[in-house]
Amino acid sequence: MEDNERQQYDRFDSLIARHRGLIDSLCTRHALGDVNRCDELRQECYISIWHYLPTLRNDAKPFHETAWVVWHCRSVFSHLHYQRRTLHFQPIDDNTTDTIGEPDDDRLGDILDTLAILLTPHERRAFYLMAEGYSAEEIALELGIKHRSAVLLRHRIIEKLRQNISKQQNNNL
């Protein structure tokens, strides 16, 4: 192991030793008492600190060092929170088609058709592609539009459907 690598490891170890309590308390607070979640968050914080350690100045004052550690931990929490909120679409390929069962009746198709009535023909085509599991990139290729336009189209479709469902629920009250 080179001297430079050894110095990097030593710098990381000493930084963690100085701020271990702070990192633990931030992770515990963010995990809301879930021990396993806290361990995962702590690990993610350590990875982020290790990855960005070269950006921390060697002559940083203790206050700046503490602020840097807190900032990276909060950045980890924010990224993980955002990842949990986003929908993860799984494309259907030859390996996953075997795991999808044939519907006994076409209730899902009826529901999709009912929802699609509200949409324009262009939106309807994109909606059916979304229902089939196409990604925004694949929808863009299929419809001949830009990727960003497909993302916005998908967002508008979802928002339009949400608003209509909300109206229907309010009318039924």
Image: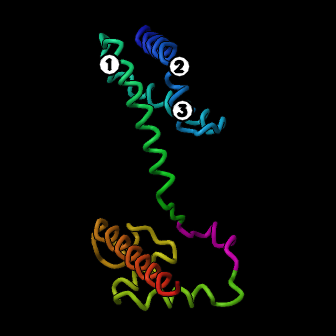
The image position of residue 21, as x and y in percent, is 53, 19
Where are the magenta residues, as a range?
A: 91-101
**Residue designated by label 3:** 27
Residues packed near mark 3 inside 10 Å, few (<14), some (14 to 19) or many (20 plus):
many
Instruction: Kindly identify the amino acid type of the residue bearing the numbered disc 1.
Output: His
- Mark 1 or mark 2: name the one nearer the start of the chain: 2
Q: Is residue 99 magenta?
A: yes
SS assignment for the magenta stretch, majority: loop
Secondary structure of residue under mark 1: helix
In the displayed structure, would residue 49 be above or below residue 156? above
**Is 127 placed above or below 88 here?**
below
Q: What residue sits 34% from the left and 88% below the top?
A: 120
The secondary element bearing badge 3 is classed as helix
**Which of these two is toward me, 76 or 7?**
76
Of pointers 1 and 3, the one earlier in the residue sequence: 3
The local secondary structure at tag 2 comes to: helix
Task: Please give the label number shown on residue 20.
Answer: 2
Residue 19 position, x and y percent, is: 48, 18
Q: Who's the residue at 54% across and 27% down the image? A: 25
Label located before the other in sequence (2 or 3): 2
**Residue, far front:** 173
Counting from the top left corner in percent of width and height, residue 44 is at: 52, 34
Indicate how the structure is coloured in the image. Answer: rainbow
Q: Which mark is residue 64?
A: 1
